[in-house]
Image (cartoon, helix red, strand yellow):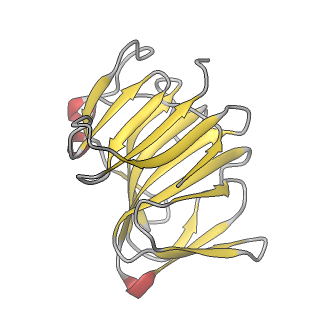
Amino acid sequence: MGSDKNQLGKDRAGGGRPVSGAVESNTLIALGSLDAMPWKNGGGTTYQIAVDPPGAGTTGFRWRISRAVIEKDGPFSTFPDVSRWIVLVAGPGFTLDFADGTSFDVVKPFEVYWFDGGLGVACRLKNDRPATVLNVMAQNDAVMRVNVATSRSALPTAGHAIVSAFGASVRLDERHVLTAAVDKPF
């Protein structure tokens, strides 16, 4: 259950305030403290967990990790030259329909799905019910590894992420942890 491609990210501390400068050591982040960023098309809300370089937003990043709630059917933003991974955390799932005519269902929780961020993609929710996902995005020139593993480790605790200069670990539930990391620092 995993996928290789590319990228890393910036940090958010408790209260949703950006961490200034590069992250030198591990930082524990409460996911509930992240600031909500409504989508431009009104179809959902994103909560940025980490981004590199620090201060980058939805543009100018090398890698980015976020949690999102998809609230209604509609297009996803395109990110040329970016690899994307998406992991269903809650809800019945959705279908992604791509501009090249391909599609796939995202219905299995904690499964890692990869796609080209430059392709136009429309999302159709299953049963018109919202879905919560984790997103990892990385520039194609970075080597990013994204996996979901069963973990008995206590860290990170439920509702938290551990973020460093090389990636993040996010607790999905009591048994599963998503890890996203670059092979080497930039």
| Residue 64, horizontal then vertical, whole percent | 51, 38
Please give the name of the residue rendered at 66% of the width and 75% of the height, measured from the top-left corner: 103
Residue 61 is at least partly visible in this image: no
Vertical placement of residue 121 versus 57, above or below:
below
Please give the name of the residue rendered at 49% of the width and 38% of the height, measured from the top-left corner: 180
In the image: residue 41, left or right of residue 12: right
Asked where in the image residue 144 lies, by quadrant, the reply is top right
Count of marks, rendered view: 0
Vertical placement of residue 23 versus 60, above or below:
above
| Residue 105, horizontal then vertical, whole percent | 55, 76
Front residue of 28 and 19: 28
Asked where in the image residue 122 lies, by quadrant, the reply is bottom right
Please give the name of the residue rendered at 66% of the width and 47% of the height, measured from the top-left corner: 83
Residue 141 is at least partly visible in this image: yes
In the image: residue 15, left or right of residue 68: left
In the image: residue 125, left or right of residue 32: right
What quarter of the picture does the C terminus occupy? top right
Front residue of 118 and 183: 183
| Residue 174, horizontal then vertical, whole percent | 23, 52
| Residue 78, horizontal then vertical, whole percent | 65, 56
Residue sticking out furthest to the right: 100
